[in-house]
């Protein structure tokens, strides 16, 4: 995501015109496991909107800028979900469909659709389209914070997309053995926090950033209630 942010900032796509995303939440589908029984209950605060959608939206705004205008539609399409091991049935009260649209501070139009469960087709596809190029980010899960993703791009006179390798400078050499695992992101985050604390830096998002992001998620939920 840091490489993607720099590509956009350096003008790879020119002026950003729009961005669109479709992804699967993984959980919040037709089945749940006993250790995930808290997910279908909104009172627990662990929803598709706050977890996979929330993490991905945070990355999207990091790359492309703040959201200015918000429209949202949510729905609960899986009215009964079951635990295949115990046959326990639960009636969810959380959205398993989140459709978000808006306008970013740069003027670009944004659209995103998260679906509960998994798709036999696309589980993560994010496009950034600009006046001079296109970027496409793909992966096998809608959980951008833990999955494996790749970037493809084309700009200028390029006729088709090609995969863009992430330069080594974006990786922490001390965590080389964790590359390609969810543990790498956790380790890299702790390493960045340590550097900020010991070197008086500000690389890691702080509490104010988190509060600002949660205010955006709250705006999105309230927009859905009034849709």
Image (tube, rainbow, N blue to C red):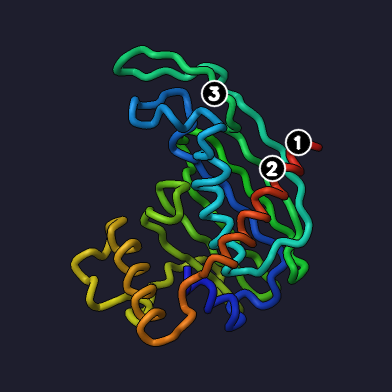
Tell me the residue that label 2 is attached to.
Answer: 221
- The residue under the point 25% across, 78% down is 173
Relative to the observer, which residue lies in front, 107 or 85? 85
Dividing the picture into quarters, in which one does residue 207 lie?
A: bottom right
- Disc 1 on helix, strand or loop? helix
Q: CA distance from mark 3 to mark 1?
A: 17 Å
Task: Report whether 78 appears left or right of 130.
Answer: left
> As drawn, is 4 to the left or to the right of 222?
left
Residue 214 place in picture, x, y as percent: 61, 54
Marks 2 & 1, CB-CB < 8 Å contact: yes
Give the residue number, with chain letter if any, for mark 3: 92
Q: Which residue is tagged 1?
A: 225
Q: Answer yes or no: do the residues labelled 2 and 3 have beta carbons within 8 Å?
A: no
Q: Residues within 10 Å of mark 1 (few under 14, many from 20)?
A: few
Q: Position of residue 160 (x, y in %)?
A: 53, 66
Earlier sequence position, callout 3 versus callout 1 = 3
Percent of width and height locating residue 210: 56, 61
């Amino acid at each position: 995501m840091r490489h993607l942010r720099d590509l956009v900032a350096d003008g790879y796509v020119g002026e950003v015109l729009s961005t669109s995303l479709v992804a699967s939440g993984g959980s919040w589908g037709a089945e749940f496991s006993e250790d995930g029984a808290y997910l279908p209950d909104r009172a627990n605060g662990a929803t598709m909107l706050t977890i996979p959608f929330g993490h991905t939206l945070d990355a999207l705004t990091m790359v492309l800028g703040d959201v200015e205008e918000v429209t949202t539609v949510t729905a609960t399409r899986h009215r009964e979900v079951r635990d295949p091991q115990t046959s326990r049935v639960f009636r969810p009260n959380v959205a398993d469909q989140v459709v978000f649209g808006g306008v970013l501070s740069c003027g670009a139009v944004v659209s995103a659709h998260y679906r509960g469960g998994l798709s036999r087709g696309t589980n993560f596809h994010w496009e950034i389209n600009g006046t001079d190029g296109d970027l496409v980010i793909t992966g096998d899960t809608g959980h951008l914070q833990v999955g494996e993703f790749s970037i493809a791009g084309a700009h200028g006179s390029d006729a088709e997309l090609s995969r863009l390798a992430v330069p080594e400078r974006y990786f922490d050499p001390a965590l080389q053995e964790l590359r390609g695992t969810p543990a790498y992101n956790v380790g890299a985050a702790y390493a960045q926090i340590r550097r900020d604390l010991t070197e008086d830096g500000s690389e890691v998002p702080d509490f104010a950033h988190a509060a600002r992001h949660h205010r955006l998620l709250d705006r999105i939920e309230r927009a859905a209630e009034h849709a």
